[in-house]
Image (cartoon, rainbow, N blue to C red):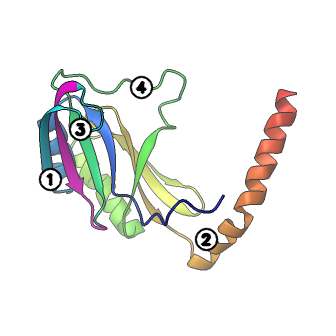
Amino acid sequence: MAALVPIHGLHHYAYRCRDAEETRRFYEDILGLPLVHVIRAERVPSTGEYCPYVHIFFEMQDGSYLAFFDLGDGQAAAPSPNTPDWVNHIALQVGSEAELHEAKAKLEQAGIEVVGVTDHGFVKSIYFFDPNGIRLELTTRTVPDEQLETYKQRAHAQLADWVREKAAAAA
C-alpha cells in the first residue's frame, strides 16, 4: 500500500488529567511549556456525546503540543493493567546533555523524584511522573546522524528477527 499522505509531524498528544490547574502548574511552571489554548465544551465534537470538559494545550518549541482533558470528575486516567509503569511514557527531547542534567537538578529541587541519567547507547534520558501518573522522559541524542542512518538501515531486519524469535518461542 502506498503511503496514506505525508505526515509532517506531531500536532498534539492528548491525555486525561485529574485537575487542569494542577496540570498547568506542572507543565507550565515546572517544565516551562506555555499554556497556549483552552477549549471548553459540553459535547464531544466528534461524537456529539454529552461530556463537559476543558481541553488544555501546552506548546513545545517545535510548534507541537501536549494536551490534556479535564472531565471535571477529579479522575486521572487509570494505568493499563497489563502493562508495566515504565512502558507507556511521553519522551520529550532537550538540546544537550548539559540541559538534561540541568533539568534533572531543577526537577529534584521541585521535589520530583527522577530516575537517571540513563544511557541508552544513542540517547541519554531521565524519567519522572507528572501529577496524573503519566511517565515522562527527557532525552537527548548522543550519537552522530551517520549512526542514526545506520540504525534506519538495520531496523527492518532487526524487527524481522524479533518476530521470528517470538514466534519460535511461542511454538
User: Which of the numbered marks, if any, corresponds to residue 85?
Assistant: none
User: Which of the numbered marks, if any, corresponds to residue 45?
Assistant: 3
Tell me, yes or no, whether the two marked residues, 3 and 2, touch with CB atoms within 8 Å: no
Residue type highlighted by circle 1: Leu
Provide residue 60's location: percent of width, then percent of height.
27, 61
The CA distance from mark 1 to mark 4 is: 25 Å
Res 115 seen here? no
Element type at marker 1?
A: strand
Element type at marker 4?
A: loop
The verdict on residue 49 being magenta is no
The CA distance from mark 3 to mark 2 is: 40 Å
In this rendering, would 41 be left or right of 121? left
User: Which of the numbered marks, if any, corresponds to residue 35?
Assistant: 1
Res 71 seen here? yes
Residue wearing tag 4:
79
Q: Quadrant of residue 17?
A: top left
Look at 64% across and 74% down and name the residue there.
Answer: 149
The CA distance from mark 1 to mark 3 is: 22 Å
Residue wearing tag 2:
148
Local packing at callout 4 (Cα closer than 10 Å; few below 14, some 14-19, many 20+) is: few
Q: Which residues are magenta?
A: 50-62
The verdict on residue 53 being magenta is yes
In the picture, the quarter occupied by the C terminus is top right
The CA distance from mark 4 to mark 2 is: 32 Å
